[in-house]
Image: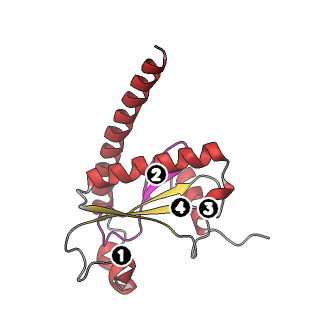
Amino acid sequence: MTKHCLICDRIKLIQDNKNPYFVRELNTGYVVLGDSQYFEGYTLFLEKHHVTELHQLAPAEKLAFLEEMSLVQEACAKAFHADKMNIELLGNGDAHVHWHLFPRHNGDTAQPGPVWWTPMDVMFSDDVVKDMPRLNRLKTALSAALDEVLKVRATEDGVKNLNQGD
């Protein structure tokens, strides 16, 4: 018997058009904004399949998932004008492969360090959780940046394929 999976529940909400944080479906995963926007633009990339470790994915899917995560983090950096991106694959709390993508800005915390040094009651305070106008603005910005990044990647892939045909 498997443990209940919060990420699978969130994916089901996406599939039922009931997840207010959903931004975009990609080949290997779903792009969603984080429940808290204390670090504005905090984004997650959820693997479509329930696996608890990267090595449980077939090699081709794993490489595609990593590549798409890289594109999502690039779009996140562009959309939210990050000075630095923090990227984490944890899974101790929610054992379903998913990436945490945090756009960071100089001076966004009292002292430099990981986002998790921010107290949870601050990070998840009422003023940064489920503010729909703000979420819609952030989803629009991230979606536009994803369009741009994916278009560049498609162009690069097309040029690569042309060059291989010589």
Mark 3, other Cα within 10 Å: few <14 / some 14–19 / many ≥20? some
Circle 1 SS class: helix
Q: Which mark identifies residue 8? A: 3
Residue to which mark 2 is pinned: 69
Q: Residue at x 51, y 50 (%)?
A: 66
Please, is residue 134 above or below residue 158 in the view? Answer: below
For label 4, the residue is 98
Counting from the top left corner in percent of width and height, residue 160 is at 43, 26
Image: 140 above or below 163: below
Task: Give the amino acid at mark 3.
Answer: Cys
Pair 1/3: label in front: 1
Quick one: label 2 or label 3, which is nearer the N terminus?
3
- Total marks placed: 4
Instruction: Check if residue 37 falls in the magenta segment.
Output: yes
Q: x, y (%) of residue 58? A: 67, 48
Q: Where is residue 139 in the image (x, y as percent from the top left)?
A: 34, 53
- Sort mark 1 into few (<14), some (14-19) or many (20+) by Cα contacts within 10 Å: some
Q: Which of marks 4 and 3 is in front?
A: 4
Of the pair 63 and 105, the residue shown nearer to us: 63
Q: Mark 1 or mark 2: which comes first in sequence?
A: 2
Identify the element where label 4 is drawn.
strand
**Residue 156: within the magenta?**
no
Residue stretch rendered in magenta on the structure = 20-42
**Residue 105 seen anywhere in this rendered image of the structure:** yes
CA gap, disc 1 to disc 3?
24 Å
Amino acid type at image mark 4? His
Q: Do the residues labelled 1 and 2 touch (CB within 8 Å)?
A: no
